[in-house]
Amino acid sequence: MLASITACKPVILQRATAIQQNPGTSANIPENLVLSTAQRTLIDAVQMQLFPKDGNGPDAQDLNALAYLEGALQDPANIEDGDPAFIVKGCSWLNDMAQRSFASDFTSLTVIQQDRVLNSIASTRAGENWISLLMYYLTEALMLDPVYGGNIEQKGWRWLEHQPGFPRPTTGKTYLDFT
Amino acid sequence: MASISTKHTQDEFDICIIGSGAGGGPVAYELSKAGFQVAVLEKGGWYDEQDFKKDEMLSRRKIFRSKIQNEPHILESPKTDGTWSSNTTGQFWGGNIVGGASNFMSGYFHRLKPEDFRLLSEFGPIQKANIADWPIGYEDLEPYYTKVEQEIGISGKVVPHPNLEPRSTADFPFPPTAEHPIATRFDKAAKALGLHPFPMARAILSRPNDGRAACEYSGYCGSYGCHSGAKGSSRAALLDKCVNTGRCKIFTHAKAYKINTDNKGNAISVDYYDNGPNSHQAPSRIKAKIIVVACYSMESSRLLLSSPGQKHADGIGNRYQQIGKNLHCCAGGTGHGIFDLSKLNSSDAAALKIRGPFFNRALQDWYFIDDKEKFGGRIKGGTIDFVFDPPSPTSAANKLKRDQDGKLVWGSAFKHRLKSHFTQSRDFKFEVFCDWLPTDECHVSLDSSKQDQWGSPVAKIKVGYHPHDLKVAKYIVDKGVAVMKQMGAHSYYGNAFTSPTANLMAGGLRFGKHAHSSALDADCRVHGTDNLFVTDGSFMPNGGSVTPTWTIYANAFRIADKIKMQLGSPHKS
């Protein structure tokens, strides 16, 4: 019975694995992802604000947080929650706010300006939810097993001295293989 | 309900057990071992050690649990203004899998005390609480508590203390599991306070036994399935052996929805949906001489209520409207002692950071409370277990994104919070267990306005609590906080709760001497039937001030003996 379940390797896992095996190489990210190139650039910048390179552990890019997010947004449970649409919508709000405040796209702003824009949208309920959701996925990229595409080389675990359990999930034995 | 297309199993069974958890496993084990033909209907699939990776996503996605969208419950809870809230919930599903929720228990095991079997005569009535003495005594269950130690595999060490229950054996068959350094610190602190700390027994093998490996001390226990087989789940400890007898057939993905009865009121068959691969939820029927219900308290009540028959107009055994009544949870609370590692010397800090061995300590100094100033006389109290929560690092990290005021924190400030939490502090927890008194405000009924994915009315669970429970819980939580303070924790706090402990429900079909005030007789046979038994925690009139799992296992072994006697000699085929 179990064999029949595990034989059906979900497409999303294949994507996550492909991303994990080729971090940072956008050419290897499969087609038909949720985010456009512009949205991807914007979220990359936001993630680096939320989880910056500051000398204290890995930053968002070190964790492969963007590719992790793109994989996670194809998880049926996250789609059911409406996350992909909400995250795409939030990209527009953020750019609108950047334009209103500084007459420029978010990605063209200085780090300080970007932080001000983030604080501005955080003062609205929807904006706050949007940042909160991006942080939810960031913490997944930080602390979940690398098999899911984030936490590259266990950088998150090593930074936080986290001892994983064993046996760890492996390709073909992740949560996606039981659904 | 059975339609023309209903599939009938060709096999004949002596006994059909609905549910394969702690209530069902012992009956399947004993009866198949004795030579009887046993069928087990289990709604979930068969997963085992090879499937139980230490993967936080398995619990985040509730992979081995029923889903709220398919099988909701309606939960009615008291509000502070005296009205009741009504919400759809999925929190009561503990394990949609062979072995049930016992796959995901922590295995903190305690016996009840003799006084728990006679709560009414020992402590007297409490207004608006439906307290009742049990129809059996501790001495009736003691041999089965001992049997569970061996068959399920309980590790521990008997240390005398004022409220140690009587035992027929000197000690546990398996030595204690490995202990975390915090246990030594705890013992010293508790003794300094004049208390009597003792090692908590665990349903976890400390050494290999009977084909099962010993604990691997991965530090990921509790809600994580056990990879070594050391955890005494019904599946690992019992059901594998049942199947090996060749006389036990476990029907997985089989959702029972009705028990059929004859014109004498006795059970004759069970209707279920076969949800296995390619079965297309086919309505099916299975016949047996004895039928056993062990689906977890609210679901066992729901099944009886959903099974009206010629002699059971309002559901099986419900002539006196006792089915679903007197449900209970575990009252109590939790508390924490948090150590700032930067304030400790390096060896103490390193010791507290160890992950793998267990805390494994408990206090029962307040199992009975004789505090005249607070309570006016001797009352029933509770237990404090000192434990580790199963790690959920992703959830912990996500919680840190908000500060004490609920405001989002990001950037370097967020990273600083993460680094400090994970590397510079350790949080040790205690859990308080005391009686959730049965009342008229805590029960199960059918909600005809809401159906599960198969179109059956779902269970409506009303969870009113008795104010006495909260008073007792607060009293004991304060004692736990004092212990944490004595241990040298840099911050410490505790809270009593009144919300239901979703994974520790019992009652609803309590056993008793009289049909007008109970659902089952002393042998856990449903009143008004000769051959329908209930062997999960539903039978308990009160839960004791401990987790009930050891008692559920023990009672199921006891009822297995009663069923064997009733069936006589097995067929020799």
Image (cartoon, rainbow, N blue to C red):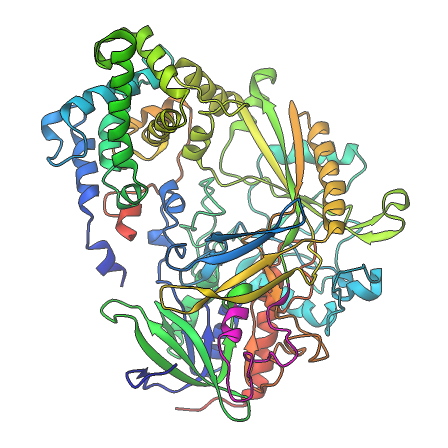
Instruction: Indicate yes or no whether the magenta region holds residue B308.
Output: yes
Position in image of residue B315 (x %, y %): 54, 78
Position in image of residue A117 (x %, y %): 33, 13
Residue at left offset 31%, top offset 11%: A114
Q: Residue furthest front?
A: A100
Residue at left offset 32%, top offset 24%: A155
What quarter of the picture does the C terminus of chain B occupy?
bottom left
Left or right of B209? Residue A129 is left
What quarter of the picture does the N terminus of chain B occupy?
bottom left
Give whichever of B392, A105 is nearer the camera.
A105
Left or right of B481? Residue B88 is left
Magenta extent: B300-326
Decide: is B249 above or below B547: below
Position in image of residue B163 (x %, y %): 78, 52
Give whichever of B310, B21 is nearer the camera.
B310
Provide the major secondary structure of the magenta segment: loop
Q: Is residue A152 visible?
A: no
Position in image of residue B443 (x %, y %): 61, 63
Quadrant assignment, res A133: top left
Instruction: Indicate yes or no whether the magenta region holds residue A66.
Output: no
